[in-house]
Amino acid sequence: MTSAKSPTLTVRIERWPIRGAFTISRGAKFEAVTVVAEIAFGGHVGRGECVPYPRYAETPEGAQTALLAMQDVVGRGLDRTAVQAAMPPCAARNALDCALLDLQAKQSGKRVWDLLGHPQPKPVTTAYTISLASAEAMAAATAAAADRPLLKIKLGGADDVERIAAVRRAAPRSELIVDANEAWTPDSLETNLAACAAAGVILVEQPLPADRDEALARIRRPIKVCADESVHDRSSLEPLRERYDAVNIKLDKTGGLTEALAMADAAKAHGFDIMVGCMVATSLSMAPAMLLAAQARFIDLDGPLLLARDRAHGLRYEGSLVHPPDAELWG
């Protein structure tokens, strides 16, 4: 057990309503369910947030249980280096890793990027997501966001050629990223990629299922293709070199900022472009990922923009321009 003189870890599940619905090829959701880890010690509290993802057999309750199992070792002084060995890469480890970093920053009175020897993050332009729907509905949603410089278009059905053409007509000046969330097949791959190329799409995320993406190595790719569900941490990079041009680094997949920063360096060394991505969550999830933005070609940190409300001291968004976190939020 921990004492008042030892770090104490508390964990809670939070629910944040989504504005409308967030729909991808695997279905729709109407709230973001997050797990928050808080470590209190010496008058300071460090926080980290994660989003357990059913695609990886994660649940909020499972993440909460995994974190609560770490209470005693946190009380004995577990640091973020030891966390990498104590837990596998997962959403729960992300919350704990980021909470430890936040606590360290508060204890030292320094910003987290100074502690890590990284440059201070600058404001960056994030993608804004258009959920999967009919071509007509997606065109209407796109038209309402056509002033945003970068849009991320969720695809994943038989009518994707019509959808991407309709979206392009509705936003003729925006850069477009497409995310199929594993919904295409080898038979539809080249047709859909050609339609995306014709619409001026600059990147396609995870067109094929992660365990059936070999076809990407056998075709000429007319635009860059980014791994998402196929990539998790540094150990998953090497097999992807012939199939993908970029990798989407998400802290819930890497198991925290510590591994994410190391993965970004490794991805660059392998020749991959980097996308920094997110789950739908509050600014507490986005804040640590801002440290990756300087290395990223594509930035997708729009989670709070999709919520009905964000937490206090959330990131400041000016349209699609997102600013680094204030110390009251994280780091």
Image (cartoon, grey):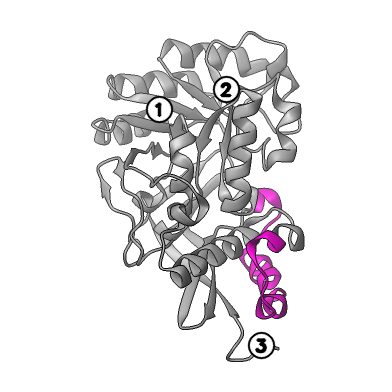
* Magenta segment includes 320: no
Q: Residues within 10 Å of mark 1 (few under 14, many from 20)?
A: some
Identified by mark 2, the residue type is Val
**Residue under label 1:** 135
Specify the segment rendered in magenta: 54-83
Badge 3 or badge 2: first in the primary sequence: 3
Cα–Cα gap, marks 1 and 2:
23 Å
Residue under numbered circle 2: 225
Q: Earlier in the sequence, mark 1 or mark 2?
A: 1
Please identify, in this view, whether the residue under mark 1 or under mark 2 is nearer the observer. Answer: 2
**In which quadrant of the rendered view does residue 100 lie?**
bottom right
Residue 321 visible to an observer of this rendering: yes
Residue at the far bottom in the pictured view:
4
Q: Is residue 34 visible?
A: no
Q: x%, y% of residue 64? A: 64, 71
Q: Is residue 280 left or right of residue 148?
A: right
- At label 1, the amino acid type is Ala
Residue 177 is situated, as x and y percent measured from the top left of the image, at 44, 27
* Residue positioned 55% across, 24% down in the render: 158
The residue depicted at 62 percent of the width and 17 percent of the height is 189
Rendered-image quadrant of the N terminus: bottom right
Q: Earlier in the sequence, mark 1 or mark 3?
A: 3
Q: What residue is drawn where x is 36% and y is 56%?
A: 325
Q: Quadrant of residue 224?
A: top right
Q: Is residue 182 above or below residue 277?
A: above
Identify the amino acid type marked 3: Thr
User: Which residue is denoted by mark 3 in the rendering?
Assistant: 2
Q: Nearer the viewer, mark 3 or mark 2?
A: 3
Which structural element holds mark 3? Answer: loop
